[in-house]
Image (cartoon, rainbow, N blue to C red):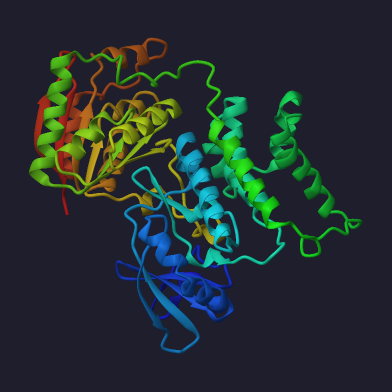
Amino acid sequence: MLGASSVDGVRVAGSFRDPAGYVFRRGDSFFRAVTLHGAADYNATRASGILKWLSDDGRLVRILDEQPSSDGNATILEVERLPWITHPYEWSFQLLKTAALFHLDLHLALLERKFTLSDATAYNVQFVGTNPIFIDHLSIRPYREGEFWTGHRQFCEQFLTPLLLRAYLDVPHNAWYRGSMEGIAVSDLVKILPLHKKLSWNVLTNIVLQDKFQAGTSSKETRFSVKERKLPKQAFTAMLRQMHAWISRLQPADKKKTVWADYSLVNTYNDAERQAKHNFVGEYVRSVGPKTVIDLGCNSGEYSERALASGATSVVGFDFDVQALDRAYENAISRKLNLLPLFLDARNPSPNQGWMGTERLGFGERMRADGLLALAFEHHLAIAHNVPLDQLVQWLLSVAPTGVIEFVPKSDPTVQRMLALRDDIFPNYDVHEFERILAANAVVERSEIVSQSGRTLFQFRRRR
């Protein structure tokens, strides 16, 4: 039963697909149980030194301890806990591309040592900052001579087709991927790709022909089975390398700049106002000491970087603008920041979904931090989308116990532009009402006006 007690712990609800094992939790620690079904492959992999080699290299989550279960039916692995668990539909194009190339590199490295991966799900890749790491020890098993890449379709639908959607059609993958959860079907992509794209060798072999093969395997006339055919290891390796070379060349086919792509470079702040904002954020982090911070509306990651420079150890940034996320990713790489920039439509955050609504946990259950930055953020919900201020404040306070929220008044040029083409239906939208609502739910530690237009920063501590 999902969520039931398992080996003196609580089984992770989404960990039910693999007969070789499952994940469970005891308090703040995580464990992987290796069942009798998966024992032979796991023991062979462990004995080879593969797991230690990958862990020492930073490519695989470390095993902290290994013990037999009390009933003797499983081996229990205590595994390293990661600070954040994210889903592919929250990744930016560049993060998804990084994860895809990492997965292929890992598979190639394993094949050199006569091991392989049993599947190709994107959910087995996670991130520490922008660095990918593999989390499923039981997906690694000995290679069987002549076997096909049985994860080819899964790799294409969970990595490749979402990348091609933006690279070829200028359509971000996030909403589509979340709606299907298992990726974007090759059959769907085939229907919308232009003919000249379908005729390219890579698309033809990995998308078009695979779609034809899938259609054939669903008919009663098919007699093809991968168990009856052989694929030489050299051809298998060449296939992975060709895929790697193709994906490494993919870039977003953005036709024009999005609204907020260059906001960090072109905005309504002058240098003194920006510095005041930096000083406020820095003082908050130094005085309160949050180690993990969520930055809502992170844009290029400018204030995420300030939080890290002031003492935070890890920041997850969220933004709706896919080009801004690409810029944040580039900044995190070039500046070596422990910043993970993710996609978020705050009007519709990632929900609990999948089997029984528990297979993939949503934003509200996964994304908790010590501190919050919500800078130049609230007006996009309150003004642009009519979210009531009291509900907005309650949602923000649910993310972290302390933080900084910026209130943008009607006198600000950004809000004036928002109201230029619509009726002003917000008679109670002002800084005093915002502060009243915030003070009713949290302690306002300090506040400061940081712009000529009246933008105000509030540092809060949530009431217990």
Q: Quadrant of the C terminus?
A: bottom left
Image point (37%, 10%), residue name? 420
Q: Is residue 350 left or right of residue 19?
A: left
Question: Residue 439 lies in what quarter of the image?
Answer: top left
Q: Position of residue 279 (x, y in %)?
A: 11, 29
379 and 119: which is toward the camera: 119
Q: Position of residue 17 (x, y in %)?
A: 58, 66
Establish if 423 lies above or below 175: above
Is residue 437 in view?
no
Q: How many marks?
A: 0
49 and 265: which is toward the camera: 49
Q: Is residue 119 left or right of residue 264?
A: right
380 and 197: which is toward the camera: 197
Image point (25%, 35%), residue name? 304
Image point (49%, 60%), residue name? 358
Establish if 341 lies above or below 114: above
Residue farthest toward the right in the current orientation of the protein: 221
Q: Position of residue 449 (x, y in %)?
A: 12, 22
Q: Position of residue 194 (x, y in %)?
A: 72, 25
Q: Is residue 371 left or right of residue 96?
A: left
Residue farthest toward the top in the current orientation of the protein: 420
Q: Is residue 447 left or right of residue 182?
A: left
Establish if 268 lies above or below 180: above
Is residue 195 in view?
yes
Question: Residue 159 lies in what quarter of the image?
Answer: top right
Residue farthest toward the bottom in the current orientation of the protein: 71
Establish if 151 lies above or below 411: below
